[in-house]
Each structure stands twice: as C-alpha cells, then as structure tokens.
Image (tube, rainbow, N blue to C red):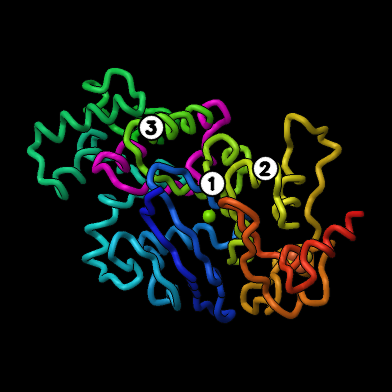
C-alpha cells in the first residue's frame, strides 16, 4: 500500500512553570492511502500532541518538536514555515475536533463557511463553490442542502453540526483527515451515525484517516490499524484483529480488560492499577514498569525496542524480545 504520511522518531516537549514535559517520546508510524489508523490511549498519553504536530499546531514558544521527521510526500512538515504549512493545512491535511461549535462561526451561514476554503485555496468562482458545497452537504447526509446552505449553525443539531464540520474538512479533497475525539461530545446513536459516515466517505473519496480517541468501542467500529500510546510512546501497533484478539503488550491487554464488552459481564472489568509516569521526568526503562504484573529487572533499566510479531503487528515489550529471554519467559510465567 502507498504511504501518505511517515512519522519518524517524533519528540515533542512543552516548557511549563513546573519544568519540561516530555509529551511525545520517539513516536514512529506510517499512514497508508485509504486506511483508518486509530491512535488510542488515555488522556495525556500524547495522542493529541502527535496529531497537532502533524498539523503544525504545536503552540510555540512553549511547545517544540525537538527531534524527528514528519514526511508528507517529499516535504518534512517539521521543517516548514508557517506560510507553507498554511497551504497544506485544510487543503492536503484537514483536522476535525471534538466540539463542532468551536469550528463553526455562529454569525456566518454554513454555506459561506463551507465554501470559504474552496474559494481561498482553489480559486473557484462563487457559483462553482456553492455547487460543490451543496454536493458535500449531501455527501454528509444533510437533507435539503440548498435550503440548509443559507442557514446558521444554531439552526442545526449537534450531530448535524459535526456532519457540517466533516464536510468542511473534506471539501478541498485532502489526502489525510485527522479526527481528534470526533464523537466524544455526541450521544451514542449520533456517534454511530457519524462513524458510519466516516466509512462511507472513505469508500467514496479514498481519504486516509487518523482517528485519535480514548474509546476502544469507536476504534472497533472504524479502525483498520491501531497504534496504542502510553506515556508519550507507541507501545503496540497492529491491525484490528491483532489488537483486539492477539494483543501482546500488558498495557494493551489491560486497556481491553478495562472496557465493557458485549461478551463480558460488568463484574469481569479490571481497571489498571496505578497511574502513568510523570512526564516531567520520564522513566529510562519501559514506561509501564510500575504498573506491570510481568515487569522484570531489565524493564526498569532499558526501554524495550520494537519487536515484530507478524504482518503489521509490532510490540515494545521485553517479554517479546529474545535478548531479554523473550517469549520463553512469557511462556513460563503463564504456564
Ligand atoms: Fe511490562 Fe516489562 Fe513489558 Fe514493560 S517491558 S510492559 S514492564 S514486561
Ligand atoms: Mg486529547
């Protein structure tokens, strides 16, 4: 599959009054054309910071990409000037956020808002932009788009507004759509409709989607591939089956056991004890050591490297690394 984006060894820091927060620590992943990659993890794990880095939205001077590359075509996005990023943002790479209201201006008709990017970036005439706007409102399932085009955001429900935001993000036909918790503010029925809409749009447009979420239910519905983040690092990646049925990392297993599932009684839910490490002073070893039931001596000393399990499945855990005794030890423990 074609790669549309390649993130290599990304490091992002924030200076605060309390010191330097090492929010993203050596994140690498690729995104293929037409796939949905979900980046999952608890709040504060660095998933939103990763997506903001791709969009060039790390707030300077406090936030800074200190290392790594983000390759989009032949461009390294970490090296571009703001003016060049602006040409890419919303055109080649679009982003939608949790709260549709912050993305919409309450005083401007949605027709004007939805076509603004088109007229600015693609120099379409007003009537051509309008035709495209109406087409995209239809695409995201807004009935009577000609009438709706002239209305204001408050005349739409929350779910409709999120559909409009999605139409706005897609209208310039981007290669990549980044959706950060796009359904968190919506109720469950609307959430399911929006997720179905992502699937439909992807089939029709071939857009690649990066879905940022803490919600494994959402991931199960739409992700082709999943990257699990913990304490600023990716600890496991794999396709949907690898992660949901064959997870190897103790943190991924813990996450899966802590969410309700149809095939499990509520009493069987097991929360992960403890809390993530302090990212002011990240541990030098595996960041999960303090919470891990399988931790070995080596875990606190050195951060495990990526081990290839098979196909698209990779894990960062000493249990899987032959140099630490690897699977042999894991097998003994579970025997
Ligand atoms: Fe647990 Fe060690 Fe694996 Fe980290 S490397 S998840 S501490 S077994
Ligand atoms: Mg977030």
What whole-number distance in Å separates the C-alpha atoms at marks 2 and 3?
23 Å
**In this rendering, position of residue 213 left or right of residue 136:** right
Tell me: residue 197, above or below residue 113. above
Mark 1, secondary structure of its residue: strand
Give the quarter of the image for residue 59. bottom left
Magenta stretch contains residue 170: yes
Q: What are the residue bounds of the magenta stretch? A: 165-191
Return the disc, 1 or 2, that comes first in the chain's sequence: 1
* Residue carrying label 1: 225
Q: Is residue 315 above or below residue 165?
A: below
Left or right of 274 in this view: 144: left
Does dot 2 land on a helix, a strand or a loop?
A: helix
Location of residue 45 by image quarter: bottom right
Q: Quadrant of residue 107?
A: top left
Q: Going from the N terminus, do you reach mark 2 or mark 3 first?
A: 3
Do labels 2 and 3 touch, CB within 8 Å? no
Q: Secondary structure at mark 3?
A: helix
> 112 above or below 138?
below
Specify few, some or many for label 3: CA neighbours under 10 Å numbering under 14, 14-19, or 20 or more. Answer: few
| Front one among 326 and 295 | 326
Q: Residue at x 63, y 70 (%)?
A: 305
N-terminal of the pair, mark 3 or mark 1, is 3
Mark 3 Cβ and ligand 2 under 8 Å apart:
no
CB at disc 2 and ligand 1 closer than 8 Å: no
Viewer-closest of 174 and 306: 306
The residue that label 3 is drawn on is 203
Q: Which residue is mark 2?
A: 244
Q: Residues within 10 Å of mark 2 (few under 14, many from 20)?
A: some
Measured as percent of width and height from the top left, residue 212 is found at 51, 50
Residue drawn 51% across the image and 39% down it: 183
């Amino acid at each position: 599959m074609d790669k549309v984006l390649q993130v290599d060894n990304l490091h992002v820091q924030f200076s605060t009054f309390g010191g330097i927060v090492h929010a993203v620590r050596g994140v690498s992943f690729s995104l293929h054309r037409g796939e949905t990659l979900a980046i999952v993890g608890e709040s504060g794990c660095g998933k939103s910071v990763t997506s903001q880095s791709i969009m060039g939205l790390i707030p300077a001077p406090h936030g800074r990409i200190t290392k790594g590359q983000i390759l989009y075509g032949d461009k390294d996005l970490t090296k571009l000037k703001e003016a060049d990023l602006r040409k890419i943002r919303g055109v080649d790479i679009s982003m939608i956020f949790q709260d549709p209201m912050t993305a919409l201006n309450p005083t401007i008709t949605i027709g004007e808002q939805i076509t603004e990017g088109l007229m600015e970036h693609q120099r379409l005439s007003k009537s051509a932009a309008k035709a495209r706007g109406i087409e995209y409102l239809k695409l995201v399932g807004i009935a009577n788009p000609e009438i709706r085009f002239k209305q204001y955001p408050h005349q739409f429900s929350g779910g409709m507004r999120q559909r409009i935001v999605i139409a706005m993000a897609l209208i310039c036909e981007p290669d990549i759509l980044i959706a950060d918790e796009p359904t968190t503010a919506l109720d469950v029925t609307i959430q399911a409709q929006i997720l179905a809409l992502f699937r439909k749009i992807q089939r029709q447009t071939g857009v690649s989607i990066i879905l940022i979420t803490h919600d494994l239910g959402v991931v199960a519905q739409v992700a082709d591939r999943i990257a699990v983040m913990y304490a600023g690092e990716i600890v496991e990646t794999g396709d949907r089956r690898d992660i949901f049925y064959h997870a190897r990392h103790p943190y991924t297993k813990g996450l899966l056991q802590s969410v309700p599932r149809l095939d499990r009684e509520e009493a069987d839910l097991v929360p992960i004890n403890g809390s993530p490490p302090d990212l002011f002073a990240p541990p030098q070893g595996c960041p999960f050591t303090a919470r891990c039931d399988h931790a070995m001596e080596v875990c606190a000393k050195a951060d495990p490297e990526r081990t290839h399990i098979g196909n698209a499945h990779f894990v960062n855990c000493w249990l899987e690394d032959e140099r630490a005794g690897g699977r042999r030890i894991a097998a003994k423990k579970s025997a």
